Amino acid sequence: MKITRLGIDLAKQVFQLHGVDERGHRVLRRQVRRAQLLEYLARLEPCLIGMEACAGAHHWARRLRELGHDVRLIAPQFVKPYVRGNKNDANDAEAICEAVGRPDMRFVRIKTVAQQDIQALHRVRSERVTSRTALVNQIRGLVGEYGIAIAQGVRQVRVALPVLIENADERLSEAFVQILSEQYDDLVALDERIARLDAQIERIAREDGAARRLMSLRGVGPITATALVASLGDGRQFARARQASAWAGIVPAQHASGGKQRLLGISKRGDAYVRTLLIHGARSVIKNCAHKDDALSCWVQALCARRNKNVAAVALANKTLRMAWALLVRGGEYDPEHARTRTEEPVGVA
């Protein structure tokens, strides 16, 4: 039995394998339990292995590479067209095996442990920020039921809530004041947790050379820089900067038929978290470039003069990501005097 290509449908406990020989004939179709997977694959001769880019895929890809196999990760939406018949583990593994052998297939870059550590840090921080926002909205809603209005924003609640607890009037019962006190304690705890996570991210950004270079770009701080490093790595999975922008979903979607092309809104593909950070950073740049005369500020001012500021923010985010890709791939430092404002691939000057 000579397996040249193997598809693995990942799971929590039971993994489905589908292997073919050099002629594409099926020679393996079986289930393997989690504890037996590495031992079983270690007995096989090195071959091409395909897996969907899902939970645990990067871990297994690294482990299987250590065994000498050529491992490729595929986005699930690219596997779906190859599924024959009803959806089940066996058909999924067969579809993965077929997809990984396509010469024009696009693959997901395997993340390092360091990249996954940074990504985990960002995910925990994002969840804490979401929880804090929900808590603040709940507090504003609760006090609103008692005829008390607190302005929007975390800062407003931080200021207003202690005063409200300390100087409670006849509208608020003792029981409700106690509830507000506990809510305020939760808010303080979330603030402290987020501050600790921010400090960790800033430390990583200072110590990582790629992140330091990215922070020289306008609108890119420690959070955005480390998120880009975690998502893009060295950026070499993309042949050019425009592919990185398309991956992030900040380029127009296309609808073409009969030789006629129609550009729609941004495609919103890829990593929504990275896209959000880039666009928020671009909004900050737009807000502060009104009285600057450098090349990038002049380009932004001219764009805002003829288009909506939200459109300008997406365009600037697109440009920022292209410059970030150039810095990751080519190294060097960003030099604003040499940054080309109307180019496909802005470069960092080594």
Image (cartoon, helix red, strand yellow):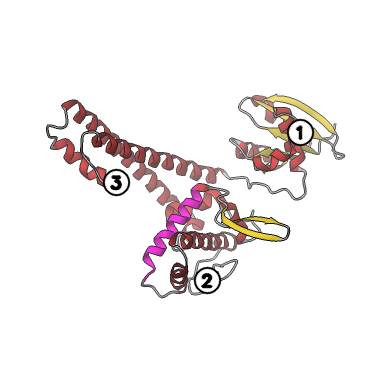
Q: Is residue 264 left or right of residue 218?
A: right
Badge 2 is on which residue? 341
- State which quarter of the image contains the C terminus: bottom right
Three-letter amino acid code at the position of disc 1: Arg
Q: Position of residue 33 (x, y in %)?
A: 67, 24
Badge 1 is on which residue? 84
Does residue 316 sit above or below 338 in this rendering? above
Question: Badge 3: how crowded within 10 Å, few (<14), some, or many (20+)?
Answer: few
| Residue that lies at the very extreme toward the right in this rendered image | 23
Residue drawn at the location 38% of the way across and 47% of the way down: 198
Q: Position of residue 36 (x, y in %)?
A: 68, 25
Residue drawn at the location 80% of the way across and 29% of the way down: 28
Q: Residue 40, can we see it?
A: no
Badge 3 is on which residue? 152
Considering the whole magenta stretch, tell me its main secondary structure: helix
Numbered mark located on residue 326 in the image: none
Question: Badge 2: how crowded within 10 Å, few (<14), some, or many (20+)?
Answer: some
Residue drawn at the location 38% of the way across and 42% of the way down: 129
Residue drawn at the location 81% of the way across and 39% of the way down: 4
